Amino acid sequence: MSKFYDAIVIGSGIAGLSFALKIAEAGHRVAVITKKNSADSNTNYAQGGIAAVTSQTDDVEMHVADTLDAGDGLCNEQAVREILKDGAASIEELAGRGVAFSQLDDGRVSLGKEGGHSKRRILHVKDVTGKAIEQALIHGITNSDNIEVLEHHFAIELITASKVREVGEGKLSDKVLGVYALNSKTDEVETYAASAVLLATGGIGQVYQFSTNPSIATGDGIAMAYRAGVEVRNMEFIQFHPTALYANDSDRFLISEAVRGEGAILRNFAGEAFMERYDRRKDLAPRDIVARAIDSEMKKSGAPHVWLDVRGESAEVIRDRFPNIYGHCEALGIHLEKDMIPVVPAAHYLCGGVKTNLNSETSLKGLYACGEVACTGLHGANRLASNSLLEAVVMATRGADALIQYLAEAESESFELPEWKDGDLRDSDERVILSHNLDELKRTLWDYVGIVRTTKRLQRARTRIQNLEREINEYYWNFKVDESLLQLRNMILVASLIIDCALLRKESRGLHYTLDYPNKLETSADTTVVKQ
């Protein structure tokens, strides 16, 4: 027996929680499905802040120009203008929900500066902005009578009208009807029906060997949407954050771009400040340029990392502005007032995703997408720093308004969704294959689909991923599902989409740089993939 909600939100970051609150405040019943705890999200890890025009010395047109410049000719200019003009209102909304943005001594809002921005416009809460926003939104969620949070539930598959028709459950126009989700505590797959579903599942960073993303960033929403026939685009544009703390493990602690915004300088092993050789903006160039510059310096010297030098500031100033970064480095024996920080690029943010319009609507009726999982056209070929949190909250508001209207106009239908069937499937005693395949996936993407690419490398990656795809699909259909299997299945599909899009782009633009096509085409175009 399926449980019915007006809307199901998959994911619990800034996009999903903002959306859920808006829908619930309009009187609708909402389920928030999250595969871990509510606070486990990419939002929680966002250090830098949220970009918006709130200063009298700044204006939206300057923010638009910076965003278009960073996006390297692939931004949707209408989307850029529409989203950025809503920035100030979104900041007011977050403040109203309890987010206390950092202030200067005179009471004005403290505005940071990051790479690619011509003005100081980054609102922040010290260097834990995402965490502060997440906590404020969760407070609102827990105090809502209309929201049910289903923690430790892994959304497996969208239920659509076309799938229902296949099992003879009536003739309905194609639209989303609900979700199958694995209850990780009971190991049972549960059926949830809804008039609408929002994908707010975040990014894909875990498909790479080295990433700043938490373990939950496995591209689940993109994979589900693609399998449901929804258009996915621009998956080749993976932003590698230039300055992740160099470490021996695969999880890379982020050193915020705001540190360079406050004057930190990148140096190679010879102690040279090298960024002036790559861009006139030096250390404040957009991320794609800085990441390629670091990659080049490391390859030329054979060094395992470069240095980030913040020694020009006093310990008190650094500790006050970046307490989280200062404490993390100090625990590792790195004292920022006298030591340089070893940094390397790491997979950080996806600029492509599930195609949506400016109401967060996808090509499937009743299905919405918001946040990093979605591709609105704002980021183009390279995201401007701190535009992502802004996009998430603005598009959550726009999507919620559209969904409320959709619910008001939707015809009332009563039907029972087909239950998930395991049949005679058995538990696997060969779990080691999953860890081996996961390791191969991550290494393949890192080695062949990284900062600098070639057609041969991409083709090698495609061959390896196709082999993994065959293995995991055989495994999926022969054994009972669990979270590790489902995540790996989604990650392999997402990796395949990244490679397909990268091979389609016969140029170098933004975050996609290939030695075989080093120049930019005169006209830009999105790369699009749709499941046939």
Image (tube, helix red, strand yellow):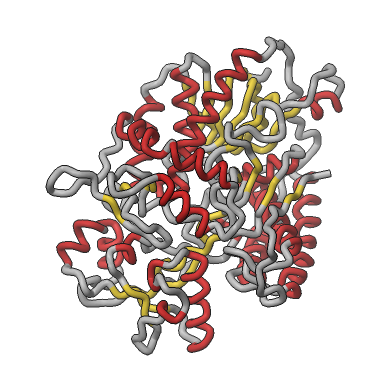
User: Closer to the camera, 264 or 139?
Assistant: 264
Say which quarter of the image contains residue 253.
bottom left
Q: Is residue 299 left or right of residue 365?
A: left
Say which quarter of the image contains residue 471.
bottom right
In this rendering, does residue 225 appear at all?
yes
Residue 494 in percent (x, y) is at: 68, 53
Q: Is residue 193 left or right of residue 283?
A: right
In this rendering, does residue 431 appear at all?
no
Residue 438 in percent (x, y) is at: 64, 60
Say which quarter of the image contains residue 308.
bottom left
Residue 311 in percent (x, y) is at: 23, 74
Please state, as top left, top right, bottom left or bottom right, where the N terminus lies in the image: top right
User: Closer to the camera, 44 or 119?
Assistant: 119
Q: Which residue lies at the image location 52% right of the left edge and 16% below the top edge?
A: 28
Please state, as top left, top right, bottom left or bottom right, where the C terminus lies in the image: top right
Residue 380, above or below 247: above
Total labels: the figure holds 0
Q: Which residue lies at the image location 54% right of the left edge and 32% below the top edge?
A: 33
Q: Residue furthest left?
A: 106
Q: Which residue lies at the image location 40% right of the left edge and 79% below the top edge?
A: 276
Residue 108, above or below 436: above
Residue 281 in percent (x, y) is at: 40, 70
Q: Is residue 55 left or right of residue 212?
A: left
Q: Which residue lies at the image location 17% right of the left edge and 67% below the top edge?
A: 315
